[in-house]
Amino acid sequence: MKKQVLFIHGGGDDGYGEDAKLAASLQKELGEDYEIIFPEMPSIDDSPDFGWLKKIGKEIGQLKEDAIWMGHSLGASMLLKYLSENKVSKNTAGIFLLAPPFWSGEEKWKQGLKLQKDFAANLPENYPTYFYYCQDDEVVPPDQFETYRQQVPWATFREFESGGHQLDNNLHLVSKDIKAL
């Protein structure tokens, strides 16, 4: 039976299309023993979270037990938001967060994306949790990665010198961590 990996893509004009390269890299690296589930997220303009939290909940609900939960960029931050604000009845083998932004500021559009102050206390600590960041990320500044490191000290943090926001569309090192679970 294949192991499932739910991959929540990033935002932007074509976040799904851009992250399809990451999903393909992950599938190639993990091989045929894994099934990458890569749903296209909604873009509901009048919803504070663009409709992503409901969709993430639906996708997690359809997974088998011990699936892997992963997100990139906005997808990673929204996966964190969902997990810290909802009780999830499914177990996961691990949580993998690629270049998640840490939303702050008073702009109206950011309010539905921001994590609660105590978000880390509400995350499931009993599952392996990994954060990945490239030092040359042109989208998410390094101080946001450091904020996560301070807020979620029990997680594993992997920092790379290069790869940019898209991690060079190469998830070889991430796949090694997944296979090591």
Image (tube, rainbow, N blue to C red):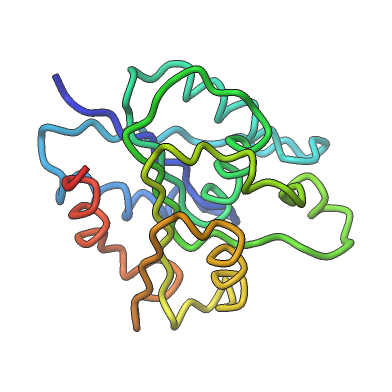
Residue 106 locus on image (x, y percent): 89, 62
Q: Position of residue 54 (x, y in %)?
A: 64, 26
Q: Residue at x 60, y 62 (%)?
A: 101
Front residue of this view, candidates 47 and 104: 104
| Left or right relative to 137: residue 86 | right
x 46%, y 55%: residue: 154
Residue 125, how many percent across, how many down?
A: 48, 41
How many tags in the picture?
0
Q: Is residue 39 left or right of residue 120?
A: left
Q: Quadrant of the C terminus?
A: top left
The one of 176 and 58 positioned closer to us in this rendering: 176
Name the residue furthest left. Answer: 32
Name above or below for residue 2 compared with residue 138. Answer: above
- Quarter occupied by the N terminus: top left
Looking at the picture, how far across and down is residue 96, in whole percent? 39, 49
- Residue at horizontal 11%, vertical 41%? 31
Name above or below for residue 3 compared with residue 133: above
Nearer to me, 38 or 95: 95
Residue at the image point whose x is 41% and y is 75% from the top? 134
- Placement of 49 over or under 166, stated as above or below: above
Nearer the observer, 68 or 9: 68
Q: Is 150 located above or below residue 81 in the figure?
A: below
